[in-house]
Image: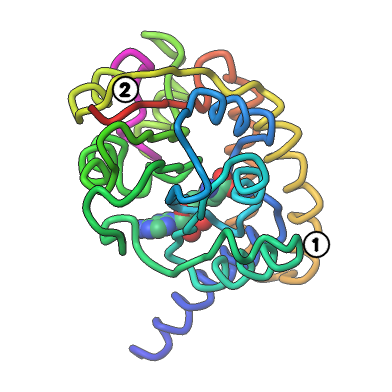
Amino acid sequence: MTDEIKTIHDFDFNLICEYFSGLERQGPGSPEATLKALSFISGLNGESLIADIGCGTGGLTITLAKNAPGHITGIDLFPSFIDLFNFNAKKVNLESRMKGVVASMDKLPFKEEELDLIWSEGAIYNIGFEKGMNEWHKFLKKGGFIAVSEASWFTEKRPEEINRFWESAYPEIDTIANKVEKMQKAGYIPVATFILPENCWIENFYKPQVLVQENFLKKYAGNETAEEFVANERYEAGLYYKYKEFYGYVFYIGRKI
Ligand code: SAH
């Protein structure tokens, strides 16, 4: 019985990893948004140490490595994503400047005041924005930067359906003003915030999933877990198209005081 449950859990985990491994990015974003966020960062050089936390398969880390000097450590909890990260780095000859390491974002393998820049796109929600901002602070050098993207409300009030969805999916979703306050209280000067354009969700996140979903449903025809998972992803995408004026991802860039 125990074995059976474990097998089901293993399958779920592998299933989700397999689904997202077929995508260049595992969250909303774009090379343009990554570069825009990078434009607010100063003082990096060839010796700089950068962490990309919740790096996934490294799609955006490659953009970072091509456009910022220094060494990047990609951190992700899932070994299959890190394998792909290191494989992708090699493919573009960047393996000497970006290395993927399996670790959890709540137990980072860095020394205090070691990092010049902490990057994290669409991933800090796994630990929570406030907790991540506070706990990661000690790993940055004084004057070092943090740049994270995070789901945020654009308005004070929202339609009930989308409010309910997000309050259950990620209760820490909040307005931009409240997130900036949390960043400031965690010990950073708020340097910039900007809303990720819609193409980061539609062109780069939801549209590439359409083909992945079709192939997935063919491969796992009759598998209820797979069908339910795809149905959830489609529901979430549908909500975005319907309510995108009320929420989205926002980049928060801060500098350690
Ligand atoms: N930054 C990437 C991936 C975002 S998806 C991109 O924008 O494309 C979120 C990532 O966080 C996933 O790769 C997931 O495996 C990772 N993750 C989830 N929980 C984690 C944890 N506790 N520690 C480290 N990474 C985690």
x, y percent for residue 29: 62, 35
For the N terminus, the quadrant is: bottom left
Location of residue 58 (image quadrant): bottom right
Residue that appears at 24% across and 24% down: 182
Image: 65 above or below 97: above
x, y percent for residue 64: 60, 43
Here the colouring is rainbow
Ligand 1 under 8 Å from disc 2 Cβ: no
Q: Amino acid at mark 2?
A: Lys
Ligand 1 under 8 Å from disc 1 Cβ: no
Which residue has dot 1 on it?
215
Location of residue 254 (image quadrant): top left
Residue that appears at 60% across and 37% down: 28
Residue 47: assigned label: none
Where does the magenta region start and end?
169-179
x, y percent for residue 188: 26, 26
User: For this view, does 14 lie left or right of residue 105?
Assistant: right
User: For this view, does 140 lie left or right of residue 39?
Assistant: left
Q: Amino acid at mark 1?
A: Asn
Which sits in the foreground, 221 or 102? 102
Which residue has dot 2 on it?
179
Which sits in the foreground, 82 or 224? 82
Q: Is residue 232 visible?
A: no
For the C terminus, the quadrant is: top left
x, y percent for residue 152: 43, 24
